[in-house]
Image (tube, grey):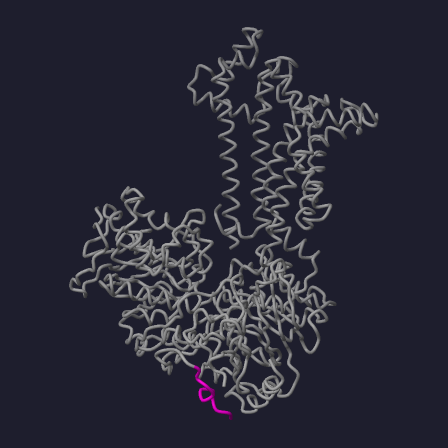
Amino acid sequence: MDQTTSHALEASYVQTFEHGNAGRPAIAAGSPPLLSIDGLTVVLADRPETRLLDAVRFEVRKGEFFALVGESGSGKSVLCSTIMGVATSELRCLGDIHIEGRPLTDVDRRLRAMIYQQPSLYLNPVRSIGFQIRETVQMIGGLSKREASERAADLLCDVGIDDPRETMRKYPHEMSGGMNQRVMIAMALAMKPKLLIADEPTSALDVTTQKQILDLLERLRSDMAILFVTHDLGVALQRSDRIGVLYAGQLVEIGCADLVARTPLHPYTRALFSAVPPLSAQPRRLHSPAGSLPDPTQRQAGCNFASRCSGTMDICRHTRPALQGIPQQVVACHNLEA
Amino acid sequence: MRRKAQKVFASKIGRALVTLVLMVTSVFILMRCAGDPVTVLLGPDATADMRAAYSGELGLDRPILVQYLAYLHNVVRGSLGVSYVYRQDALGVVLSHLPLTLMLTCSALTFAAVTGIAGGIAAAVFPSSFIGRACTIASLVGLCVPSFFLAIVLMLMFSIQLNWLPTGGADSWRSLGLPAVTMGAASSAVLARYTRVAVRESLDSRYVLAAFARGIPFSRILIHHVLPNAAVPILTILGLLIGGAVTGSTVVETVFSWPGIGNLFVTSVGNRDIPVVQAIVLLAGTAMIMTNLAVDLGYTWVDPRSNSSET
Amino acid sequence: MTLPIGPPRVRTPRASSEPILELRNIDFCYPAARRSAAEVLGGSRLNKINMSIRRGKAHGLIGESGSGKSTIAKLLLGLTAPQAGQIFFDGELLTRARLAAFRLRVQPVFQNPIDALNPATPIGKQIIAPLLVNFKMKSSGCQARLAAAISAVGLSGEILGKLPHQISGGQAQRVNIARALILDPEVLICDEPVSALDMTVQAQILNLLSDLRESRGLSLLFISHDIRSVAYLCSEIAVLKRGTIVESGSRDQVLLDPKTDYMKSLLRAVPNSELGVEMALPSKPCSQPIGRRHLPAER
């Protein structure tokens, strides 16, 4: 991305949040970003030509709810594990990730926390909930067992569990998916993180439970930045301040949620929109681009969506388009360049 | 949930008792198949009076069901016949040999548990390091080498060449060394392999990943997250090994002239001392069932999920 | 029962308001030991269920986890029997004697597409398996039907030799649908068939189900917790809460004029309900450079 566009992005924060999205807390304009990712490329260590992520760049500020929309194979899970610092040894990461201005390796693990898609699988099945939360709380150090239990009960109350003591005695398999997800959020909050990464936390839950969990996350976001990864466009547009669309390892569109909702620009983003079944009495045929996501081993230079896009030109196949556009919405598509 | 756990508990104990009764009944049937029980149990040179008295006790002219009940009564009382060779109560003979065998098998099991589980964990946590590879190879050797071969090799090295340990008998603590290691070697290898697989599976699980991402130190993850989840298969194998502890190993006891139950079994079969053989079989069966019950109950303590299902 | 020879016929609509599959006054309860945690929390029984699926129509069943919707699927597939009540198929009471024939005419599509396939057997063999098992046909005799089933679901022949781990979730679900279609059933019971799939793939499968319903006169029961998919595909909707049907009716009635608070709360919980309704989509996506005028005006 060139100099002018990055300045424009910078300016966009000022413009967007001074206007303020209705009801959403104003985010400190002009402050340095909490999470800053630049030129992040993740490849397989033994086959460097397979790129799971390709020069990804975006920023998230404190108090912001940033939704990253992508389907399976887009690289969103790899992105989450890389930011958390738990990428497997089979991957090699190039590029910069900075949290609060410091590179990832210098950052205390406690500044970032993550919640996952199927919470029951991410909780130890043979230890009680109370044991697991206490263990996380005691990582801060200097707490007696009783104090840790108190703090654990407080955290459970914060996430909306009515009877914390009773819940702390239970085991993960004795509770529903929604409850387990609340427990995971409580554990994530225990360290008072600045960045919360949510990897499809509500995809496995019912719609009413999903709403409760999302409401909970909105309540908690004032102290943190939330990076919310999902494949559900509806959730992303409703709850987020800004949206990024990830396709086959490339970020193809970033913008304010309102704007993207009204005018999606990238052909893939438009395809996502037309694939959502409308909740109305007018049936309209759902559109879906033919073909499927290219395998990481078969991705070539140029735009990864070229094989499925109906507006493909020659340039699309060999030159990757840069993210360009107005401050509040940038898109990477040769078709939309001036 | 607590009541459910109690019900599961009670059903396991119930099942163990049923298995016990079935085992005892099988021995009854087998004994009847082997010929006239009185001749079998009292020996060919019993006097007519003894025969008559024992017949009366067993109730051989009475219906088979009554005989069966008398037999059960005898088993519970411990009156399993008179040994031909020792001229004493058969069960008494067997029990007198028990302490030595238990000494041997407990030492062997301790050795096996410590080396096997530690080796398995090392192989799982550090698979490509020297220690890890060494443990994997050692467990393979332990599985493949037959115990009599290992016994003789060890005897050759430590008793005959180096003269550190005696070759046989049960005179002192030092004579425990070689038999215990020989017996423990195979069990250690089996334990090591199962432990390695179980610990590997647990290390690859998502809850361990989540704990690691939260910054919990690896030592704590190993003790509280990995090992408890790996415990179920390890417990199963341990149960089978402990169950075999009562009879000991006939091969090892014979090679090292260790006067335990295994040795007794071999000599009694050779002498056709049926009461003693029967006593050993019943004792071994009971021990195996009881240890498996203990392992079964141990599952409920280690894995709370088993309280909710009836497996 | 003999199969019709040749490609499946388009069914002549027989008084299509007649129900083909009906549940009347069904009561059901799992034995205590087999209940999952969700069922324990949400109730584990079905009470007085009355439901009917009409010929050639898609019927939707909305319910949350633990509501009993998968239990209804099992009942309708003949995999379990109710404690009380009757199941009617094609106007006749379903008895034990008729169960085998019934199961051939009602086929399932389940939630996890790859898990529904045998990991060690090639796809082609798995699709014709119902024919081999039920009619003792030889695999050479099944090739015509296999080709028809594959093309009906939009797959090409090269998938036949592959193993399940080599294909995507969307392709796997198409394979499952092909396998369900190969017996030429009259009803498809779909239990959360698109929940495990990405949005664009969901759209493809929903379109496929809709096309199959129209071209083959299939009746569909579409069970899901996702109201959008149900609203798109189905003309009739029933709402299940803790084992009881609390609301049912045509799609318009249930979506636009819900009577119960439960349905109202479900509708409110759907994120971004206006999404997808009015999209000013060009009928053909951009075929030429659009130029600056399509970017939103600077503020």
Q: Going by the image, does C260 lie left or right of A76? A: left
* x and y percentages locating residue C117 in the rendered image: 41, 52
Q: Is residue C139 something that shows in the picture? A: yes
Instruction: Farthest residue to the front: give it.
Output: A314
Give the residues in magenta. C289-299
Q: Is residue A262 something that shows in the picture? A: no
Q: Residue at x 45, y 47 (%)?
A: C120
Q: How many marks?
A: 0
Above or below, A272 against B74 in this view is: below
Give residue C225's quadrant in the image: bottom left
* x and y percentages locating residue C288 in the rendered image: 41, 81
Give residue C18's quadrant in the image: bottom left
User: Residue A248 magenta-drawn?
Assistant: no
Q: Going by the image, does A25 lie left or right of B123? A: left
* Prevailing SS of the magenta stretch: loop
Q: Nearer the viewer, residue A166 or A241?
A: A241
Above or below, B12 against B85 in this view is: below
* x and y percentages locating residue A88 in the rendered image: 63, 60
Above or below, A69 against B175 in this view is: below
* x and y percentages locating residue B158 in the rendered image: 80, 27
Instruction: Farthest residue to the bottom: give it.
Output: C299
Instruction: Farthest residue to the right: give it.
Output: B163
Give residue A75's quadrant in the image: bottom right
Instruction: Farthest residue to the left: give it.
Output: C15
Q: Nearer the viewer, residue C45 or C125?
A: C125
Which image quarter holds the N terminus of chain A?
bottom right
